[in-house]
Image (cartoon, rainbow, N blue to C red):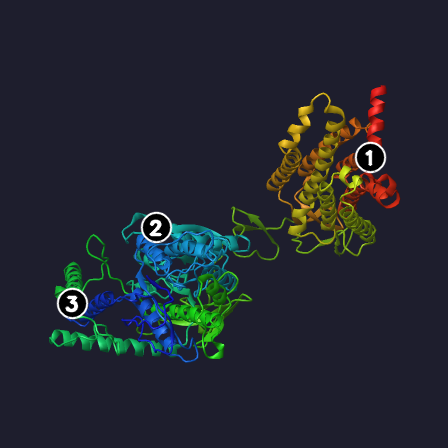
Amino acid sequence: MAWAGPRARSEGKHCRSTGCPRMDPRRDGFCPSTTFKSHGYCMSQAMRFAVGEINNSSGLLPSTTFKSHGYCMSQAMRFAVGEINNSSGLLPNVTLGYDIHDTCSEPANLHATLRALVEKGGQQVQVLPTFRRYQPQAVAVIGPDSTRLALTTAAILGVFLVPEISYEATLETLSLKRFYPSFLRTIPSDRQQVKAIFLLLQQFGWTWVALLGSDNTYGRDGLDALYKLLAASDVCVAYQGIIPPNKDASSPELHNLVRILRDVRVNVTVVFSTRQIARPFFEVVVQKNVTGMVWVGSEDWSLAQTIWEVPGIQSIGSVLGMAVQEIEFSMLERFKSWKAAEDSAMAEYTGRMEGGEDTEGCTQLGCTNCHSLTTAPDMYDAQASFNVYSAVYAVAHGLHDLLGCASGACSKGTVYPWQGHSLTTAPDMYDAQASFNVYSAVYAVAHGLHDLLGCTSGVCSKGTVYPWQLLQKIKQVNFTLSKSHISFDANGDIRKGYNIIMWNWSGPSWAFNVVGAFSVNPDRLSIDQDKILWHTEDGQAPTSLCSQACQPGEKRLQRSRHRCCFSCVACPAGTFLNRSDEWAPAGSEACFNRTVEFLSWSDPISWALLTPTILLLLLMAGLAILFALNASTPVVKSAGGKMCFLMLGSLACACSSLFCHFGEPTRHTCLLRLPLLAISFTVFLSCVATRSFQIICIFKLNARWPALYEAWQRRKGPVLFIATSTAAQAVLCLAAEAASPSVPRRNYGAWPERVVLECGPSTAGSRTAASAYTVLLSAGCFALSYAGKDLPASYNEAKSLTCSLLLQLACSAAILCTQGVLRGRAAAAVRVLGALCPLGALLGGYFLPKAFVILLRPHLNTPEHFQMAIQRYTRRLADA
């Protein structure tokens, strides 16, 4: 597929090709020094002329035509550039130019990308520490169309922050700005398409579906994204398969795929595939006589002529599909008129060449006031044009023989490359939509330049344009083009939805109806049921269910891993199916509603627990401010210095985890309860253990092993210990969550008259592991603190920490003992209280004595006092 980039040039240069119209001397220019090359343009026109002759011939390849989707896209870009250059309101006194490259393969795509990045006025790509002042040949890139090629181009251009706007690459991965920072697109992302398909399945209540995707990035990624959405909903996926590429209708793999579809007995199949891979699959579907099914198609094939031309495809059932929202046809009419003028100029020029007339002075078609080219290039172009002309006719004669066209009608068999190049037909509607995407991309670049150059005053500035500057402006564009709104979101995706189309075979030929629309921001699907023509006899929407809903008095009996597949069995005698939260005591003649129980925010017990929790958080904040203001004093330094703030922060996070116990349980609160408390508490205890160990090393172990403390500091022992200890607790929490995910559930077994809202399944094992780990750390802290009981008073927290840690151990034991006994509000309240008490005790035992000295005993917070305490300790040791 061709792509192009507007590029800066110096004022006064003239373009010598149709690719860049002759410039008004009053306009500055954004045009490459070598634009759409005259020789290359003549070759493309020679090919167009030859193809046109063959298509108009009744003897060679009858009823067979050639069209070039890529060529149509390049013409759309030329048309857009011409309109902008002739506009007095958009980019006045500035002329756009471009280069067009054929990206028919990965090497060609890479070469074209590097050509765009060549430094302006040079012949090489500069690799610099920063590209803020780097001027490549192109200031923006349009294309390529292929997702596979766009991944390469976007990764390279992203390094240089050169804006790239693709018109057909839909892969969701390209929206990741950390990998592709300069990528934008004028076609919606597959993420939006997947949402539209998901809402469509929900709209019609289809809960038993099959998913098929093409074996490429487009199909696999789209299929995975759709499966994730369906797995979280009430829709069951009966089968998920991949359509193999490069196969024909005789492929055993395709036949096996269709056989599986028939065996799983689904009525709805989603096909997320490219048109090239989908065609042989549908040929097999027709061969196998698969009828009466609903097919939901992705935008790549839903309007593809190569699919609806499959013989007998009208019998497969109803086909719904995604299509990019329809465009304003006034632009297409102008485009067609422009192309007609181009074709007319080409025909006139060809006639003059055949008649031997002098063509000097206008070797490029459709070009008015062309600059005169020398005779040598004309002769060279004429000879090469005839070579192209001959080559096209050689391909046509090969196809004529291969398709058996001597009888007057060509066969419709598949053509393989080893037989002869297959020139497939590109659908007009697909070309029209893609052309408008190209058209929009060029206008987005133009509006970005218009803003960057300050053209709102009527005259554009002539400053240097760097790609990263243009990228920021393109991201901010917001304009209307042919009644279509053009703007990009934060991911570089255009804010555009999809039309929901349906194939219509009621007339003499294929057609389609727009039966609905999917809009974004917010995501909304609307369907006009009156426009839908179903294949069913009664004209109603078909159903796609694994099992029919049970009748009153029946209960479900699961019979497979799919929740949609079940058997219905009658309720035993003397019982009935209770569909409500009701209960009845013994001997009752009526049912009563169960009481829903959880620790609500308005409960008096909740207020009694929330009040000290909030006060504790405020106290932590106050202590943090106090320690920050006195960070250079001996008391703060002896408490750990900067480590104090990590300790206070971890206590604050642990305290914040208590809020997850209040209110009706949700997925997030259940998930955060245990890890947030356990990991935060681990960080605090690790800091206490590290600080105690360091003080013991300095006062007690330094005399025996002087290298120990030095090695501890040199190898960053404190950081390593805290990180390792915390990581171990995080792994325990992760393993516990993986083994038994904590999710909200309704417990009917606690009391007959109540339903308890809690987090389940039972997390006794995970709580035991986390609590055991914190108990182990607490015991270590206790041992280290006790070992320093005879240290100088200013460095001795043995008494206060001992009490705090003993309280923490007691609370942990209480929680473990009551874990299986208490239910409902009582269990939640005990858990909150069991965490609140040790948090308050540790905060009070470690930090409050130091705050007391800072505020009320400032004479003890001096270097002299600490020095005297150390001297007394040294004398005591000497006397002993």
Name the spot of residue 743 as percent of width and height, x first.
Answer: 64, 48
Name the spot of residue 722 as percent of width and height, x first.
Answer: 66, 36
- Secondary element at tag 3: helix
In this view, the residue in front, 830 or 809, is 809
In this view, the residue in front, 509 or 300, is 300
Residue under label 2, please give it. 244
In the image, what residue type sits under mark 3? Answer: Ala
Q: Is residue 376 visible?
A: yes
CA separation in Å, label 1 and label 3: 97 Å
Q: Report crowding for label 2: few under 14, some 14 to 19, many 20 or more residues within 10 A (C-alpha).
A: some
* CB within 8 Å, label 1 to label 3: no
- Secondary element at tag 1: helix
Position of 135 with respect to 350 (left or right) is right
* CB within 8 Å, label 3 to label 2: no
In the image, what residue type sits under mark 1? Answer: Phe
Label disc, if present, on residue 866 of the rendered structure = 1
Name the spot of residue 291 as percent of width and height, x first.
Answer: 36, 60
Q: Is residue 532 visible?
A: no
* Residue at far top of view: 880
* Residue at far front of view: 864
Q: Residue at x 81, y 51 (%)?
A: 615
- Secondary element at tag 2: loop
